Amino acid sequence: MTAKPDSSSPRLALHASGGPAAAELLRSLRPMLTQWLPRQRWFAGKGRALDGLTLSAATELLPRPGTGAAPALPGLLHLLLGAHQGDHADCYQLLLGVRPVLPPALAPALIGRPAWGPLKGLAVYDAVPDQRLTGVLLERLRTPGRVGALRFAREAGAHLPPGLPARPLRAEQSNSSIVYGDTYILKLFRRVSRGVNPDLELPLALARTGCARVPAPVAWFEADAADPVTLGVLQPYLPGSSDGWRLALHALHREADFTGAARSLGRATAEVHTALAAALPTAVLRGPSLAAVAEEMTARLKAACDAVPQLRPYRVGLREAFAAVRELAEAGQGCVVQRVHGDLHLGQVLRTAARDGAGGGWSVIDFEGEPAKELAERRRPQPVLQDVAGMLRSFDYAACQRGASEFSRRWAEATRDAYCAGYAEAGGTDPREHSALLRAYETDKAVYEVLYEAHHRPDWLPIPLAAIRRLAQAPPSPRRTSP
Ligand SMILES: Nc1ncnc2c1ncn2[C@@H]1O[C@H](COP(=O)(O)OP(=O)(O)O)[C@@H](O)[C@H]1O
Ligand SMILES: [Mg+2]
């Protein structure tokens, strides 16, 4: 079944044939999906009413039970579903399993049993925890080609073994991931938009330049439209790795030094930036385009001050941080921009131990960028200091988990210095020497955090507010631009 019943669907207009079957399918699933979708962790439109659902594409990856060559097997249905909330619409990727009887282990994944329509009386459920069905996805990735609205592709020369056992990754995520035999991990993007996802684009470009700091994509699939929509990326799984957040908290808990790890993380970040600059276009912001960066930051500060009263006492000092960038622009200085990670923090880096003669070290993952931003914005070249500022803010968040103390303050400062020193060693430029831009990017990030915490985790609001107090008072220092 392949269908495009509604060309007004958000973001996507897939080139697939329409049909009454798809319209009937959606009508029969609509009540249960309307309940289920907003409860998913990856649903981006929380807190707003869900006004309607439309179907952008439906592809049967395995026929529903009772039909096809193996009538006893579960069915697997791939949907691209438009979720309409007021005048806003998002598109979500759904993988639905279909069985007459749901095994008890899959009961938590149940979405519902349609009372009528093509799936009448069958259990419809989220297929991600069903290893039988996610095994089918790996099989498709092994054999590139088109299936309905989908196109499966593989990196040249990649050989994927068959039959690797699948398990869902049980982590709090904004997407869904499946691990195959501790060898590969498939990230299924949940909220999707038209255009290549940077989480495929950047690791692929980096791997093709020989940069070993990212798990290189081996296969992927996309909606087969004129402008493809990336739906999933398969890459090597790093067994036994720990993310930077866990390692940092562990060090803090033991009152241990983290500067060695931070220094090598700084080096890894610089290596990734250097490789991205070599692989993809760069530009220089000067004059009005650099001043525009300051204006955008100032506008975000104003919006945050309007929403969060606790921020208002610091408004003047924070605006100075952005005014310093405008002064750089007026002084005729330039700032190099390039593709960056876009959402770099301790949770986006994994460290593996050295083994089997292979060097361990830091790998950088999740190049999707800040999920709340539109795709075009996430793909826009930025100063590398945006990523550096993200990581520095993350050190501060980690240190605050241990409570405010002299030890935490010193730990954060030493970690920050070591990271910048490592970056300078491998990047040839020390972020601390570009204090005006670094302060502006840290401030912009902390303002975003204030807004986020005020809305989602008020208990955490003191963390960015403490940084805001510091950033609002930062003493004037020699200003230079990013190289
Ligand atoms: N290549 C990998 N090897 C091992 N674990 C991984 C790998 N990629 C991702 N993970 C695990 O999955 C988690 C989420 O991955 P991520 O790409 O950051 O997804 P999300 O967009 O949902 O944040 C990571 O924190 C990590 O625990
Ligand atoms: Mg992530």
Image: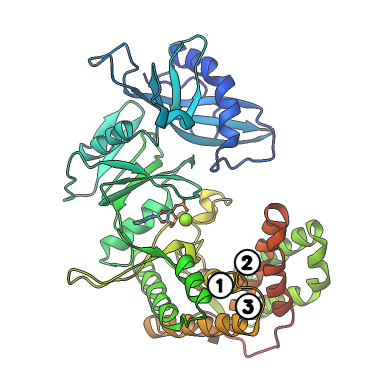
Q: In this view, does 150 lie to the left or right of 159?
A: right
Q: Position of residue 410 (x, y in %)?
A: 59, 85
Q: Which of marks 3 and 1 is nearer the N terminus?
A: 1
Residue 251 position in % (x across, y down): 48, 75
Name the residue: 52% across, 22% down: 6
**Side (left or right) of 144 relative to 426:** left
Report whether the residue tagged 3 is closer than 8 Å to ligand 2: no
What residue sits right under mark 3 in the picture? 439
Label 1 with label 2: CB-CB less than 8 Å: yes
In the rendered image of this protein, does residue 249 appear above or below residue 430? above
What amino acid type is highlighted by mark number 3? Arg
**Callout 2 crowding tier (Cα within 10 Å): few <14, some 14–19, many ≥20:** some
Residue name at image x 69 percent, y 78 percent = 471
Identity, as a three-letter code, of the amino acid under mark 2: Lys
- Residue at (43% x, 15% y) in the render: 122
Label whose residue precedes the other's in the sequence (1 or 2) = 1
Residue highlighted by disc 1: 389
Which amino acid, mark 1?
Ala
The x and y percentages for residue 370 are: 54, 56
N-terminal label among 2 and 3: 3
Q: Which of 96 and 19 is in front in this view?
A: 96
For residue 160, which quarter of the picture?
top left
Q: In whole angstroms, how far apart are the C-alphas of marks 3 and 1?
A: 8 Å
Element under label 3?
A: helix
Pointer 2: what residue? 445
Q: Can residue 11 be seen in this view?
A: no
Looking at the image, the residue that sits furthest to the bottom is 478
Quarter of the picture containing the N terminus is top left
Residue at the spot x=16%, y=51% of the render?
157
State the separation of the CA atoms marked 1 and 2: 7 Å
